[in-house]
Amino acid sequence: MTSIKATFAALAVATTAAVAAPITFTGSTFETRQGNGLSFGSAAAYQANFASLPTGGFGYGSASLPTGSWNPPGYSSPLNISNQGLVGGSATDIAFHYQVNFTSVAGSLSAQMAPDFGLGGGVLLDGSQVAFNPNDMWWGGAWGNTSQIFSFSSALAAGSHTIDIYGQEGCCDGFTGFDAQFTPAPDNGATLALLGLGLAGVAFARRSFKA
């Protein structure tokens, strides 16, 4: 038998930027399809696999994440970021796609995405791979578990940007965390913006098995 024990943490969003709205989140989505139990050799391959899977089906679906514009005075909400939590779906055989859309001034983005991808996955920023791991990933609710977390840094031009996260899970649909730090370029007159993005459910236990 398989059981999931989970505790939830609220999102924390804060900024110390000297200018208003250095980064604005314009919409984030979550979609799942029935997975095929495979691992792949790149983030683009996970993306292509997801696109090839049938949409719909019992236990899978899509949802919009309530991100809005996450700037001062901040945003805080408990979110149940999992297939079960968002669409009332299956805990097994899941292909995931998270998409985070935002606009920003020129600057540098460092981001961490903490999944439960038992069959690995990858991250694309504006269509280019920035993180990839084909192995079993489960962060266990601990940001210090760095080998189980996607992490990347990238310079951004001013304008619109998209982060796409793909992965596959055999069992058991643990919770996802996402966090980032954005530093506007010096000519934007800002120092540092620290942002907790909208994919921040926390689970401290994923699985317990009985023979």
Image (cartoon, helix red, strand yellow):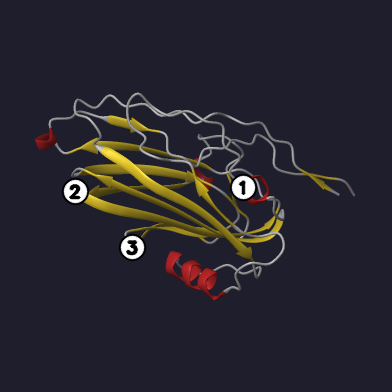
Name the residue beneath numbered marker 3: 128
Q: Earlier in the sequence, mark 3 or mark 2?
A: 3
Q: Nearer the viewer, residue 160 or 109?
A: 160
Name the residue beneath numbered marker 1: 86
Q: Earlier in the sequence, mark 2 or mark 1?
A: 1
The residue carrying pointer 3 sits among few (fewer than 14), some (14 to 19) or many (20 or more) residues within 10 Å by Cα, namely few
In this view, 11 is above or below 165: above
Q: Nearer the viewer, residue 148 or 196?
A: 196
Report x, y in % for residue 5. 74, 36
Report x, y in % for residue 108. 24, 43
Report x, y in % for residue 92. 72, 58
Name the residue beneath numbered marker 2: 158
* Type of amino acid under label 3: Ser
The single residue placed furthest to the right in the displayed view is: 211
Judge left or right: residue 12 versus residue 211.
left
Report x, y in % for residue 84. 68, 48
The residue carrying pointer 1 sits among few (fewer than 14), some (14 to 19) or many (20 or more) residues within 10 Å by Cα, namely some
Judge left or right: residue 40 versus residue 59.
left
Judge left or right: residue 21 versus residue 78.
left
Q: Nearer the viewer, mark 3 or mark 1?
A: 1
Residue 131, visible in the rendered structure: yes
The single residue placed furthest to the bottom in the displayed view is: 52
Which residue sits at x=63%, y=67%?
56
